[in-house]
Amino acid sequence: MFQYPFMQNAFLAGTIVAVMCGVIAVFVIARGLSFIAHTFSHIGFSGAAFAVFMGWSPLNGLLLFTSASALIIGRMGVKTFRRDVSISIVLSVFLGLGYLFLKLSNTQSTGMMSLLFGSVIGISVSDIWLMTWLSASVLVLLVLGYKMLVFDSFDPVGAEAARLPIRFISIGFLLLISVAIAESVQFVGALLVFTLMTTPAATARYLTQSVFRMMVYSAVIAVIGLWAGLVLGYYTSAPTSFYISAVEGVLYFMALGWHSLRERMAPKLQLPSAE
């Protein structure tokens, strides 16, 4: 398996992206932005269609459209009730543009299927370098703004009372999500990208209460799911994206079951003895 360059590229680039997604997914869950992550994935598909029309690399179009939509949504309002409306409007506009570019480019259906459901074959060395630089930038920014982001994500009322730059934090984090989504689409596709952006963090939430450990667990879970998907996809005829989603789902339900069992056992362990 590892004698093929495309599998080496897939494992290397996939590990980098999985670590980044696992870390940022903790804040996506904490801030209740799962729907936005799903929305960015659809907008990213439109960006990839635009890149194909222009003769660019799909990743460039993904980054352009997701980043632009993040800025638009962030500028239209931070409040949840306004954000829901703005997301719907921005998504409809970008999806319309994506359909237009598909018609104008006359792209083959196989290329569009790889954008929708992911493909590890077309990842080049230049893509790996770009993903490494983008992932490192996202992680560095998360480290620099860690305290403010944790405060605003897990105690928004306290963050507002402390006069933190809430609007700046929200827009900045939306931009980080947009970059993470753009990178992940090439592995799991636009329709399944929220697998890496939500499931690992949702799983880690049942394993620990510490934010830092939650980030570590989430990154490890994301990497395990991606590695398992690549291996199973190589030895079988099923798509890699299916295995990534399936493994991440199994790990989630295992963690959920363990958490439920521990919750049921806790009262019994705390009961005083008859003596």
Image (spheres, rainbow, N blue to C red):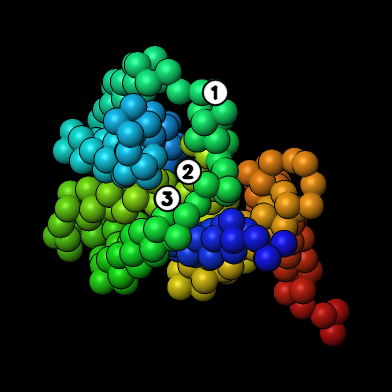
Q: Residues within 10 Å of mark 2 (few under 14, many from 20)?
A: many
Q: Earlier in the sequence, mark 2 or mark 1?
A: 1
Q: In the image, is residue 120 above or below residue 137?
A: above
**Closer to us: 165 or 53:** 53
Residue at image x 51%, y 28%? Answer: 112
Q: Residues within 10 Å of mark 3 (few under 14, many from 20)?
A: many
Which SS class for mark 1?
helix
Q: Quadrant of residue 202?
A: bottom right
Circle count: 3
Amino acid carrying mark 2 in the image: Val
Amino acid carrying mark 3 in the image: Glu
**Closer to us: 78 or 181:** 181
Q: Which mark is residue 109?
A: 1
Pinpoint residue 76: horizontal percent, then vertical percent: 18, 33
Q: Report how far apart the C-alphas of labels 3 and 2 lie in the structure.
A: 6 Å
Amino acid carrying mark 1 in the image: Ser
Residue ID for mark 2: 185
Residue 200 in the figure: left or right of residue 94: right
Badge nearest the viewer, 1 or 3: 1
Residue 127 in the figure: left or right of residue 81: right
Question: Mark 1 touching mark 3, by CB under 8 A?
Answer: no
Image quadrant containing the N terminus: bottom right
Q: Residues within 10 Å of mark 1 (few under 14, many from 20)?
A: few
Which SS class for mark 2?
helix
Q: Which mark is residue 183?
A: 3
